[in-house]
Amino acid sequence: MKARILVALLALAALLPAPRAAAIDSIPPLADPVLQQRYLALTHELRCMQCQNESLADSPVGLASDLRRDVREQLLAGQTDDQIRDLMVSRYGEFILFRPRFNARTVWLWSLPAVLMLLGIVIAVRVLRDRQQRVGVDTEESLDA
Amino acid sequence: MNTSATSAARFVLPLGAFMLLLVVLIAGLYHAPQKGIIVSPLLGKPAPQFSLPGLLDESAPLQAQTLRGHWSVVNVWGTWCAECRAEHETLLMIKQQGRVPIFGIDWKDDDDKARAWLSELGNPYERIGADREGRVAIDWGVYGAPETFLVNPSGTVVYKHVGAMTAEVWQQEFLSRLL
């Protein structure tokens, strides 16, 4: 019985909204709401290199907070999102981007879903046509009989 | 439509797709970089511009220019890093060997603790820069101490080792690259 209550409580706790990522730093958010928005977006798409399946925004480790500070400073210095991404890639490689950029090496990665989709449509159309034909044949046969 | 041809296609097509997938996955297994190790984009590029105050001697800062004109080993460490203690013996051996000077970047450390560590364990470094805020380590693409770089006389990063330095790694990956 106690265990059930505990499970129920845990389930309820899971429904609560997660604490906001911005609260991970003691530093107040950027004064300019547009910059703050870009800051949040960037730190969510950059990987924490120390705990590699977390984003910079979500990671509590020291390196992530240093990199957040860096992103913040670059934004304040007037760098564009692409310039900041380039800077991060120049230090840590493409791996730091959760969303790989489109280039010669990632062409297959980005085009594969579309290719598979097309392939699927072609196969589906052929199967459906095949089935329709067969249904046609069947009815003819039954009429003949 | 020829029935035997369609059934053959039905059999061959999935099999072909499966074989293709198999080839891709096996190739992936063999070409996967060493697990967890990220190849540094710095390799073959000039070492980042930086200047750090000297840990032991304020008048001897560690700068990009310090690494010019001779081969250098740049070792990123900290007293909070357990693996750094493990590799310290090897660093001392490298210093004793005297082929390449080791420059230390003391990463996000307490200066006093760092000095105490060196007087206790011995100092393998030619010069040490104190990266108190961790800004320079970021520019070097460091993601975990210890990390050790090999820089050639023109200031180009030639090799990077992540994790504790060992005699084997020193022999095979560093000494072999010296010209």
Image (cartoon, coloured by chain):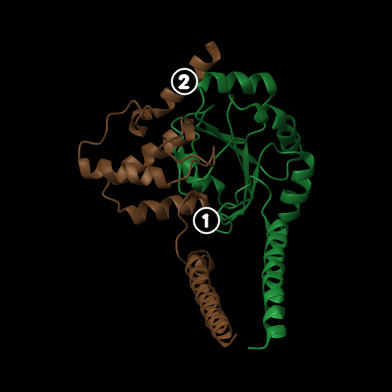
Q: Where B52 falls versus B46 (above or below)?
A: above
What residue sits right under mark 2 in the picture?
A: A8
Query: The chain shown in brown is which?
Result: A
Residue B79, how many percent across, how many down?
A: 59, 24
Residue lying at the far front in this picture: please name it.
A145
Residue type, numbered disc 2: Ala
Residue at 75% in and 38% down: B166
Q: Which label was assigned to residue A139?
A: none
The crowding category of the residue bearing disc 1, from other C-alpha atoms within 10 Å (few below 14, some 14 to 19, many at least 20), is: some
Rendered shade, chain B: green
Instruction: Say if B115 sits above or below B156 in the image.
Output: above
Q: Quadrant of the C terminus of chain A?
A: bottom right
Secondary structure at badge 2 equals helix
Q: Tell me the residue at 71%/64% (across/down).
A: B22
Quadrant of the drawing holding the N terminus of chain A = top right
Q: Position of residue B153 (x, y in %)?
A: 60, 54
In screen coordinates, is A101 left or right of A141?
left
- Residue tagged 1: B46
Which corner quadrant of the image does residue B78 belong to? top right
Pick the residue in front: A10 or B125.
A10
Q: Amino acid at mark 1?
A: Pro
Q: Which sits in the foreground, A35 or A76?
A: A35
